[in-house]
Each structure stands twice: as structure tokens, then as C-alpha cells.
Amino acid sequence: MRLTVNGQPYDLAIAGHESLVAILRGRLGLTGTKVACGRGECGACTVLIDGKPAYACLTLAAACEGAAVSTIEGLGAAERLHALQQAFIAHDALQCGFCTPGQIMAAAALLAQTPRPTEAEVRHGMSGNLCRCGAYPKIVRAVLDAAQRLEAARGA
Ligand code: FES
Ligand code: FES
């Protein structure tokens, strides 16, 4: 089957039971997407499928044929960070960082849908992503800041 990840097509032989996260990490080397619970409870494995957030640990890779999958590697580059990545750094919105790629991908989906979210909308929109380090206040501030950065960039 053909899997398109971050705009790049991959032709892969995939067994019906293989999860999307197993293919991303194990076959494509895209290890930015993390696995914590492995059973749809924490959001560490959040990626975008056709722009919508999805738990890659619960998604069958074979079900993604024809879809556009986006991972943290496709969001920004080291020399050109995405506004969310800049804001997470600026607000120190992490401790161990293990949940961070999933948090950022969930936030990217939220801001695409709701460019100017309220704090309550950020909390609600990010409620599928847990942080064992409890960095929630800074994560919320970072997402709100990223919304402003993106708005400023659109107006530039
Ligand atoms: S690793 Fe997928 S939801 Fe926790
Ligand atoms: S920063 Fe450690 S789990 Fe969120």
C-alpha cells in the first residue's frame, strides 16, 4: 500500500494488524511520535490524519491508505521551527518532553480549527493529551501564545 507521511509517499508492505505508530517509528524512522500507554489513553502518539488528530497507537496503518498523515517531523524544521514549537520553548512547556510531540500535534489541529481559542477551548481541545509531569499551565500558555504568533504571521 501507499502511505503518505509529511507529504512524502512510501510504498510499503503492511500487515493488517500493524499500527500506524509501529510503521512510523519502526519502518520509517519517524521516532518523534511517542508511545506511552499504547492503548488510546494518553495522546503521546497523536498525529494528524487528513488534518484531524488521531492516536497512532490505535490506528491501523492499512486504514491510512490514501490519507495524508502528518507527524511532528513535518511540522517544522530545526532551522525553522513552527510557532507552536517556538512557543513551547519560550514558555518552557515541558519537563521530560515525552508527551510534547503529541501535545504539539493536538494543538496544531486545534489551532487549524480554532485560530483564536479561549483558554477554556485550549483546555478542552487538548483534553485527550495527558502530561505525567503536570506541565498543563505552561502548555496552555504556550498554545495561546502560538495562536497569537500565527495570527501575527498571517497579518505580516
Ligand atoms: S500511546 Fe497512543 S494514546 Fe497513549
Ligand atoms: S512533559 Fe513529561 S509527560 Fe509531559
Image (cartoon, rainbow, N blue to C red):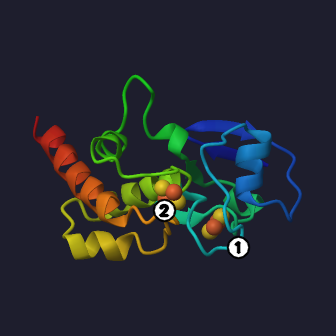
Amino acid at circle 1: Arg
Q: Residue furthest left?
A: 155
The residue drawn where x is 19% and y is 70% is 118
Q: Is residue 50 visible to the viewer in this orientation of the structure?
A: no
Identify the residue shown where x is 27% and y is 41%: 90
Direction from residue 103 to residue 63 in the image, left or right: right
113, above or below 149, in the image = below
Please tell me in which quadrant of the rendered image residue 43 appears: bottom right
Which residue is labeled 1 in the image? 39
Q: Position of residue 47 (x, y in %)?
A: 55, 56
- Percent x, y of residue 133: 48, 62
Helix, strand or loop for disc 1: loop
Image mark for residue 108: none
Q: Earlier in the sequence, mark 1 or mark 2?
A: 1
Q: Pick the residue in front: 77 or 63.
A: 77
Residue 100, position as x, y percentages in the image: 48, 52
| Residue 150 horizontal side relative to residue 31, left or right | left
Q: Which residue is at 71% across, 67% downward?
A: 38
Q: Nearer the viewer, residue 59 or 103?
A: 103
Which residue is tagged 2? 133
Q: Nearer the viewer, residue 139 or 82?
A: 139
- Disc 1/disc 2 C-alpha distance (Å): 19 Å
| Percent of width and height locating residue 14 | 85, 52
Q: What is the crowding at mark 2: few (fewer than 14 residues within 10 Å), some, or many (at least 20)? A: few
Q: Are marks 1 and 2 in contact (CB under 8 Å)?
A: no
**Which quadrant is home to the C terminus?**
top left
Q: Quadrant of residue 73?
A: top right
130 w.r.t. 77: above or below: below
Q: Nearer the viewer, mark 1 or mark 2?
A: 2
Q: Is mark 2 within 8 Å of ligand 2?
A: yes
Can residue 29 be seen from the camera position used here? yes
